[in-house]
């Protein structure tokens, strides 16, 4: 199964046999082989090819295909949960620091708002480009990921300051608390087994995300053509509903991210992949924060 997150979708952080319903668990660093008996086959049961993208695989896959992920040399350091936590803490820490600096150094008062918003837009676009570049790279680039986090922090800092000072006082802190609560809640639910990430869950989330993105794109198009909020998906009652849907989708993305990280560790991914895990988690948390910020702004402005 491929992740909804573009960072993971090219890496093969997937435990296909786990989703298929058999009980085989992959061994870290080794080939994952599953055997299924075909009741209609003549002869021995068919054996499928290894699906571990990080294994040093001596077996040929069908059509000569190999795993899409980078293979670590034998004996090389493998990714651990501590690695993921440390790298995620690094990217989020840089993002928070640059956001705080942007909040303090780029005021959004009447005299400076045009310059501050301009800097935020440029930083946001640059962060988006870097994010896309890293998403399509086969290997992690720590410098690129750190730069992305710094630029994303500048964008979030200015936007948060604008919303907090000119639309809804206290919205930024409320959005931070909401994001932390969603992260903690999804993590607890995932570890407790209340959320089962399987093919049905993945398909539902992907379909919902595609519909959400298409609606937002259409709304933006109408806003550009006709001005205002387009079809009204970002204001009023519809805006509140869409904000809640956005937060729920972000929570589903978190569950998918947790599953991908867990599978990467189980498969013995090389340690450098922890940077990709941190990058993907940061993308999801930024999504949730922005949806919370927008939802709070709508709620307070409607009072």
Image: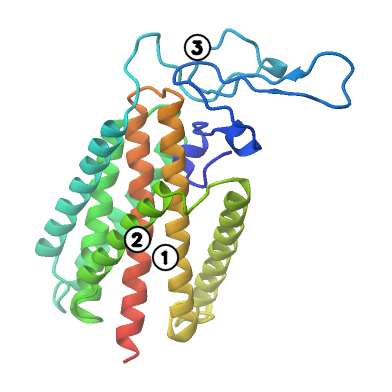
Q: Nearer the viewer, residue 108 or 118?
A: 108
State the CA–CA distance, disc 1 to disc 2: 8 Å
The reply to whether dot 2 and dot 3 touch (C-beta < 8 Å) is no
Between circles 1 and 2, the one closer to the viewer is 2
State the CA–CA distance, disc 2 to disc 3: 38 Å
Q: Is residue 44 visible?
A: yes
Give the quarter of the figure containing the C terminus: bottom left
Based on the displayed image, in which of its 4 quarters is residue 239 positioned?
Answer: bottom left
Residue of label 1: 247
The reply to whether dot 1 and dot 2 touch (C-beta < 8 Å) is yes
> Of helix, strand and loop, which one carries label 1?
helix
Residue of label 2: 182
Expressed as whole percent of the image width and height from the top left, the position of residue 119 reads 24, 59
When the figure is inspected, residue 76 is found, relative to residue 168, above or below; the finding is: above
Q: Residue at x 58, y 54 (%)?
A: 206
Q: Nearer the viewer, residue 62 or 145?
A: 62
- Res 56 label: 3
Nearest to N terminus: mark 1 or mark 3: 3
Badge 1 density bin: few <14, some 14–19, many ≥20, Cα 10 Å = many
> Of helix, strand and loop, which one carries label 2?
helix
Q: Nearer the viewer, residue 135 or 188?
A: 188
Nearest to N terminus: mark 1 or mark 2: 2
Residue situated furthest bottom in the rendering: 303
Expressed as whole percent of the image width and height from the top left, the position of residue 16 reads 60, 33
Expressed as whole percent of the image width and height from the top left, the position of residue 145 reads 30, 38
Q: How is the image coloured?
A: rainbow
When the figure is inspected, residue 95 is found, relative to residue 223, above or below; the finding is: above
Based on the displayed image, in which of its 4 quarters is residue 273 positioned?
Answer: top left
């Amino acid at each position: 199964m491929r992740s909804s997150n573009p960072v993971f979708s090219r890496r093969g952080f997937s435990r296909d046999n786990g989703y298929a319903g058999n009980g085989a668990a992959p061994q870290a660093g080794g080939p994952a082989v599953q055997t299924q008996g075909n009741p209609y086959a003549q002869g021995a049961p068919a054996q499928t090819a290894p699906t571990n993208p990080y294994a040093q695989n001596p077996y040929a896959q069908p059509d000569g295909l190999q795993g899409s992920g980078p293979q670590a040399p034998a004996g090389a350091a493998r990714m651990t949960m501590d690695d993921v936590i440390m790298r995620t803490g690094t990217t989020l820490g840089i993002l928070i620091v640059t956001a705080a600096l942007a909040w303090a150094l780029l005021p959004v008062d009447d005299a400076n708002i045009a310059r501050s918003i301009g800097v935020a837009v440029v930083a946001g676009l640059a962060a988006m480009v870097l994010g896309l570049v890293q998403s399509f790279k086969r290997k992690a680039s720590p410098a690129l990921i750190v730069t992305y986090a710094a630029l994303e922090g500048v964008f979030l800092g200015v936007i948060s300051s604008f919303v907090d000072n000119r639309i809804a006082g206290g919205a930024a802190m409320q959005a931070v608390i909401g994001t932390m609560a969603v992260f903690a809640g999804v993590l607890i639910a995932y570890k407790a087994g209340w959320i089962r990430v399987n093919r049905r869950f993945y398909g539902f989330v992907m379909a919902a995300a595609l519909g959400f993105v298409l609606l937002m794109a259409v709304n933006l198009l109408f806003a550009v053509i006709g001005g205002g909020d387009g079809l009204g998906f970002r204001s009023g009652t519809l805006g509140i509903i869409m904000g809640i849907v956005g937060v729920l989708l972000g929570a589903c993305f978190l569950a998918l991210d947790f599953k991908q990280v867990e599978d990467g560790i189980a498969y013995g991914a090389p340690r450098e992949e922890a940077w990709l895990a941190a990058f993907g988690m940061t993308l999801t948390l930024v999504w949730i924060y922005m949806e919370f910020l927008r939802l709070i702004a709508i709620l307070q402005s409607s009072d």
